[in-house]
Amino acid sequence: MFKRISSTEPATGSEIWSGETGDAAAEVAAARAAFPEWAARSSSYRMEALRRFANVVRKREKDFASLISRETGKPFWETQTEVAAVINKVEISITAFAERTPKRTLEAAMGNKVVVRHKPHGVLAVLGPYNFPAHLPNGHIVPALIAGNTVVFKPSEKTPASGEFLVQCYRDAGIPEGAIRLLQGGPDEGKALAAQPDIDGLLFTGSARAGRSLHEQFADMPQKILALELGGNNPLVVWHPKDVEAAATIAVQSAYLSAGQRCTCARRLIVEDGHEKPLLDAIAALIDRMIVDEPFADPQPFMGPVIDNDSAQHLQEQWVELMMKGGKPIRRLDRPYEDRPYLTPALIDVTDARDIPDEELFGPILQVIRVNDFDSAIAEANNTRFGLAASLLGGTPDQYEHFWSHVRAGVINWNKPTNGAPSTAPFGGVGLSGNHRPSAFYAADYCAYPVTSVLGDRVRGTVAQGLRDPNMQED
């Protein structure tokens, strides 16, 4: 049964989009019908089609960025970088497809050849998140289409307008309508799409809780590819930096970009006990200068609101829980407007707190943890079920190598923020942060499967052992 859904601007509360929920079965059927023709096209044909898509987005760059800002609350400067990433994803994916899935021919015995080629899975479902409503689902869609799959894309129910705009760009680029289908709706439609028997896999970016549910749902369907890119409780270790102000700047960028609504944002700041005050003072000073405002404000804000009032309320409850467990606020999480989801950047020392939950606080909250030595810092960094991103600021080259060797994460940086991973490299995590299927440059790996063929120039058959001699009489 179809229902009306709508999307509102976090910054103002105004409605910007409304529409009806879709039919998962119908969308999958349309994608299935289109698959044979799309898969039969040459990879060069599909690549050129995707290049046309990039050109369409390039012509609408400002309009697209403006819509994402309105729908997510992110500053306009930030959404412009997101749309640029959508455009750049095409050439990166073309390079990745050539590098990760080339045809390989090996010489074998007796003049035979071993050939490795790749085939598309079929129909792939893509479930997108709200924090990067264009870039992150596009990171699945583009490599899936290049490989020859057809796609059913369900945007987050919190960003349906951005999802619709993205799919319209594919349409206007001449991508067949059956090759990229749009399913609008909420959790019920997402569950219905994941449960469709005629999908060949599901590519998901979102929370660990939703990822765990999908993993359970697919447990008895090993024939279907499941790529999970989930969240993180990411550590940022700061250890004797030569430039404290620079370290504070990177800490602020790591923790508060996108109002803390990035899966790679730093959630835990790990510092040496007794040496932390200059760093924390510098971070607090930057927080006090930080502009939190609507996306198009002048001057441009560092961050806008979180996605909606429910999220803001949940973050406030998590903040109160940290304080009740013994956390000591350095900068409070305040909500300037009760009816809008603006939150101020928060900093809290939880060193002496009890039973801090190992959760991804998906907002502008940074927890400080003081430790006695570098080994304790590494142990604290690993004190999580997640394993997405980690970074060390300061330290020596030997300490970074020790950090890299012992920290369990899919992204491990030195003197750089935890967030902002390059699309030209693989991206993903371990533990609750994903199922070992890195996306970004390695998305080509899960969008096609390898087929090994042994080829002979003519039919040869011998049985060397186990047959009776036809010339011998039986007794």
Image (cartoon, rainbow, N blue to C red):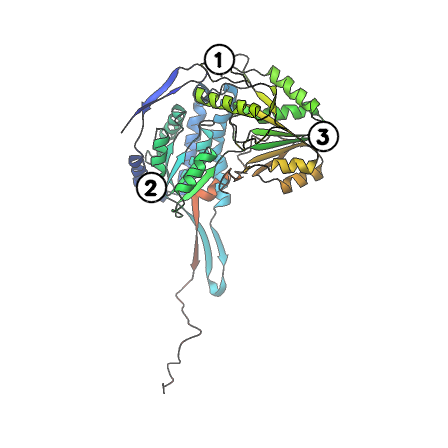
Work out whether residue 234 or residue 438 is closer to the camera in this orientation and state it.
234
The numbered mark, 2 or 3, whose residue comes first in the sequence reads: 2
- Please report contact status of discs 1 and 2: CB closer than 8 Å, yes or no: no
Classify residue 35 by image quadrant. top left
Q: Amino acid at mark 3?
A: His
Give percent across and percent down for residue 100: 50, 45
Give percent across and percent down for residue 155: 39, 29
Distance CA(mark 2)–CA(mark 3):
56 Å
- Secondary structure beneath dot 3 equals loop
The local crowd at label 3, few if under 14, some if 14 to 19, many if 20 or more residues have their Cα within 10 Å, is: some
Q: Is residue 178 left or right of residue 464?
A: left
The local crowd at label 2, few if under 14, some if 14 to 19, many if 20 or more residues have their Cα within 10 Å, is: many
Give percent across and percent down for residue 180: 36, 34
Work out whether residue 241 or residue 384 is closer to the camera in this orientation and state it.
384
Residue that label 1 marks = 337
Distance CA(mark 1)–CA(mark 2):
49 Å
Q: Quadrant of the N terminus?
A: top left
Residue that label 3 marks = 240
The numbered mark, 1 or 3, whose residue comes first in the sequence reads: 3
Residue that label 2 marks = 35
- Secondary structure beneath dot 2 equals helix
- Please report contact status of discs 2 and 3: CB closer than 8 Å, yes or no: no
Q: Which mark is residue 375?
A: none
Give percent across and percent down for residue 72: 45, 22
Q: Quadrant of the C terminus?
A: bottom left
